[in-house]
Amino acid sequence: MSSEIMIASEQEGLDADSIDVGVVGTGAIAQRLHIPEYENHEQARVTAICDVEGAKALAVADEYDVSNHYTDYETMLNEGDLDAISVCLPNHLHHDVVVAALERDIAVLCEKPISTSLAEADNMVAAANESDAILMVDQSERFGPVYEKTKDLLDQDIIGDIHNVRSRFSHPGPEGWSPRSAWFTDAEASGGGALIDIGIHNADLINHLFGDVDELMGYSDTLSMDTEVEDTSVAVIRFEDSILGTFETAWRTDPPSITMQIVGEEGVIYVDKIEETIRVEFADKSGVLEVPVPEESKYGGPIAHFIDSVLAGTEPTVTGADGRRALEVVMGVYRSSERGGAVELPLPREGEE
């Protein structure tokens, strides 16, 4: 009989009051969101910056008073003594950095989309499963108060059984957000255009709110931009529980239009992300409810939630598997558009067709 004594710890997560974070990639999302959010949080500090452009890494490190800067992420992971990293790179570069960090038991917050291929996403999810650290994908729309409140209403069954959904996520394009990042319209670097850039938000939201997609028929095209990637995508979707929906994504939508219409047995919910409003119209003209929307996420936002999850050693609300599910919807629309027919989800793994 083994003499091994099993002792359960009362404390999960890190034995620390704060985490040291490295940021890989210094583009707009890193400078506008990740670095400031970490710096403004009492339980996190950015201690390393990495960018292949040494001058840029140094300039950003100086701007935010970060002590260490690197041009090679492997060196940063080996020498940085980090608890966590944010991956803020072009989409096609996510995989290698995420896996390398997880293999070292360093927690990862990866920008959306998780990757540009399902095979790579599978590797990333597997690495997270084998690691003592967590992988969170920054599907940031989940943390929007308007969608958190919508999820609460659906959980309360406020309009009964859901029949159909119209979900739209559109804005003027990436130039306004990140005018120097030409990779958004580079098919190899981005994996696509509007669909994988902002349609990934739409995909994650419908998965989160309505469950898994069973089948879809989609179209993607370049209607107004002089670029090799699509600027518009639409799809008709059937969910596993027979809910029907339409899924719309576009660049070149000015002003932006980010809305959702949810039709149920007992009424309709109208959600407007831009206006931050939720209106419920009940069936049989029984009344209209203007739903108050909180000013902030109940989690404090994605960065705050990531920090809390790392410190507590708990699974984040948006896991690597969730990021993969959203990517699978996007890839399904691409595949349907290319083949001119409906596709079923889950999609076959590579080599299974």
Image (tube, rainbow, N blue to C red):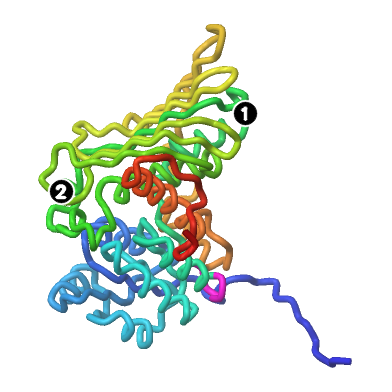
How many other residues sit within 10 Å of disc 2, few (<14), some (14-19) or many (≥20)? Answer: few
- In the image, residue 352 above or below residue 173: below
Q: Position of residue 19 (x, y in %)?
A: 44, 72
Using the image as rendered, state which of residue 210 and residue 59 is in the foreground: 210
Q: Amino acid at mark 1?
A: Asp
* Magenta-colored span: 129-134
How many other residues sit within 10 Å of disc 1, few (<14), some (14-19) or many (≥20)? Answer: few
- Residue farthest to the right, as pictured: 1
Helix, strand or loop under label 1: loop
Return the residue at label 2: 175
Does residue 307 appear in the picture of this structure?
no
Q: Which mark is residue 157?
A: 1
Q: Are marks 2 and 1 in contact (CB under 8 Å)?
A: no
Q: Position of residue 138 (x, y in %)?
A: 40, 56
Q: Position of residue 165 (x, y in %)?
A: 47, 29
Label 2 and label 1: CA atoms lie apart by 40 Å
Using the image as rendered, state which of residue 24 and residue 235 is in the foreground: 235
- 35 with respect to 18 (left or right): left
